[in-house]
Amino acid sequence: MQILNFDLEQEAWMEEGSCVYANTELFFPVGSSMKAIKQSNEAKAVCNECVVKVDCLEYAIRTNQDSGIWGGATEEERKSIRREYRKSGSLLNF
């Protein structure tokens, strides 16, 4: 019998994130209600104080994370960033 492990690949910068001790649910708002927008803004505030914000965003782009707040960007914002990233290969404009 083979047991599969589905853990996210841990990267060194992940241990330095401002979100390490935050409630994970904060970074995954559901819908577009005022409550979800407020939650998204609260998550982004945590990201904006984070020293590994760019590493987090780059990881989300590279691994195609399609839900949640990563590196201070929502799913929709990452779609736009991803297009630029594919053209230039960097996140310098973010």
Image (cartoon, helix red, strand yellow):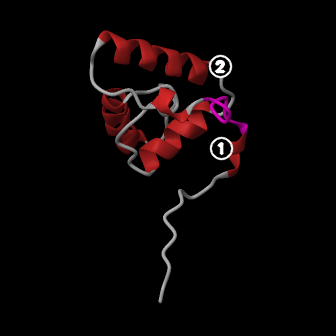
Q: Is residue 20 magenta?
A: yes
Indicate which disc, 1 or 2, sits on the residue closer to the N terminus.
Answer: 1
Q: Residue furthest left?
A: 32
x%, y% of residue 37?
36, 14
Q: Which residue is mark 2?
A: 49
Q: Is residue 24 above or below residue 86?
A: above
> Where residue 50 sits: x, y (%)?
66, 26
Name the residue furthest front.
1
Observer-nearest of 26 and 56? 26
Q: Provide residue 35's location: percent of width, then percent of height.
A: 36, 13
Residue 69's label in the rendered image is: none
Q: Is residue 46 magenta?
A: no
Report the magenta residues as a range: 16-22
- Which residue appears at 57% of the width and 58% of the height? 9
Q: What amino acid is labelled 2 in the image?
A: Glu
Describe residue 8's horizontal placement relative to residue 12 as left or right: left
Give the residue type that dot 1 points to: Met
Q: Residues within 10 Å of mark 1 (few under 14, many from 20)?
A: some
List the residue tagged with mark 1: 14
Picture residue at 47% right of the left edge, 89% below the top: 1
In the depicted view, which residue is nearer to us: 40 or 78?
40
Q: Within 10 Å of the Cα at label 2, are there few (<14), some (14-19), or many (20+) other Cα atoms?
A: few
